Amino acid sequence: MGSRVSLANKCLAIFGTANVIIITSLLGVLWMSSSSVLQDYQLEVARQLAYVWINSEVKAEVFDDDDVNIHLVRISEIDRSDNTFVERALEAFEKDEGSLSEFYDHYDRDQHNYFQFAKPITISQMGSLRKEGFTDYGSGVNAPSVSDPLEAILVIRRKSTFAKTQLNDTRTLIIVAGIVGSLISVLVYYFIFKRLIFSPVRKLRRVTERVQKGDLTARSSLATGDEFEELSIAFNEMLDRMEKDQHRLQKMNESLDLKVEELAEVNVGLFESGRLKNAFIANVSHELRTPLNSIIGFAELLEGMSIETEKDQEKRIRYLRNILTSGRSLLDMINELLDMAKIESGRMEVNLESTSISDLLEGLVSIMRPQSKTKGLELELQLQNDLPPVQTDAGKLQQILYNYLSNAIKFSPLDSKVIITASTISSYGDSSAIRIMVKDDGPGI
């Protein structure tokens, strides 16, 4: 990216250039008018010299000095073939036919300014001159009302060193004034812009840089009393809205994060539920096959068996018991499948009734004790005296405890102890609850 010109430099360049152009234009007018003023001054001096010469008592046709030369030139003495000042003045007077009262010219030579002035003298004016040798008393003169032709030209030639020097000094002063004025104006513009424009802009820029870095607490505190202060207030209001929006977005993001975590947990639960369901179906299909095979096998034995002795009768009874046991086991599995289907469909019903925890646990221990003895485990029941009845679904509670005991017996090491305890605990104001625990030496759930 190329180098950029700052706003301060742009403003200084634009206003400085405009100011220099304005000052140069104004001083240019003074430059040109200085020469005109000097020329008007020279003309006024020449007019005064002509007036004094015409009305003075000096009896000289020619006044010659280093700085001033005054002489009267008769028309008859002018050589019209020369392009001199007198010849040009005569042509101008004749062309104007008496309405032109003066003719002048100026030029510079050898660091001096020369001013030439010509004034027409008519015959009537010649008669009023009080100069010796100028008035011709012998020649007749017509009345001025009839004719007053041009008789002579009064020529004044003036050399002025001061005028040339004054003109040069004036122009030098104009140049110096222009340079100094331009520099002062640029400095004044610089301090004005720096104080009134650049300083507020820089403050706003620093605030925007802080915001760009992520600091939304940055605020502008301009108190200029103009549009910059209004811009600062609007900028702060925008930052307030941005900060509120950011807090709102943060809360929304936090809420979304919680939702995502909840969805992740739900997905994990669904995945685990699906895995357990698949494992359960596989196990159930295997478990269902076992009692069915037992029922079919014992039924086939009964079908082909002849009852001749008492021993055969005992076998028959034992086979029937095995069939009943396998049938009940199969029925329990089918009931579990039905309960699982009800749970998943949301149609599981809980039948609350008054239940004695002591009776429920004693019956459950009686059922599970043969299994514990087969594995060499001691099954111990610890009941608190006077356990109150509870409102619960006895069948489902028994099924839950049965599963706990089955796992405890299945995974406990040999010659260990499985303990079932039931005791009351304080809970929920006036109500009380019963805590049931199954303790074993297995690896745990």
Image (cartoon, rainbow, N blue to C red):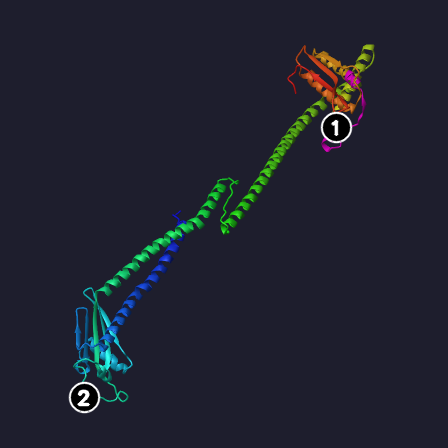
Residue 303 part of the magenta-drawn span: no
Residue 339 place in picture, x, y as percent: 75, 28
Q: Is residue 161 left or right of residue 315?
A: left
Task: Name the front one of labels 1 and 2.
Answer: 2
Which quadrant would residue 56 be assigned to in this image?
Answer: bottom left
Q: Is residue 387 left or right of residue 9?
A: right
Magenta stretch secondary structure, dominant: helix
Mark linked to residue 139? 2
Depth check: give the residue in front, 385 or 45: 45
Disc 2 is placed on an element classified as loop
Which quadrant would residue 429 be assigned to in this image?
Answer: top right
Residue under the image location 29 percent in, 67 percent down: 37
Q: Is residue 140 left or right of residue 396?
A: left
**Residues rendered magenta in the picture:** 334-363
Residue 204 place in picture, x, y as percent: 48, 46
Q: Is residue 400 left or right of residue 143?
A: right
Marks 1/2: CA distance?
Answer: 164 Å
Residue 306 place in picture, x, y as percent: 81, 15
User: In this view of the protein, can residue 155 be seen by the observer?
Assistant: yes
Residue 341 part of the magenta-drawn span: yes
Residue under the image location 69 percent in, 27 percent down: 281
Mark linked to residue 166? none
Disc 1 is placed on an element classified as helix
Q: Is residue 161 above or below residue 377?
A: below
Depth check: give the residue in front, 334 or 271: 271
**Label 2 Cα neighbours within 10 Å, binned few <14 / some 14-19 / many ≥20:** few
Q: Three-letter amino acid code at disc 2?
A: Ser
Mark linked to residue 339? 1
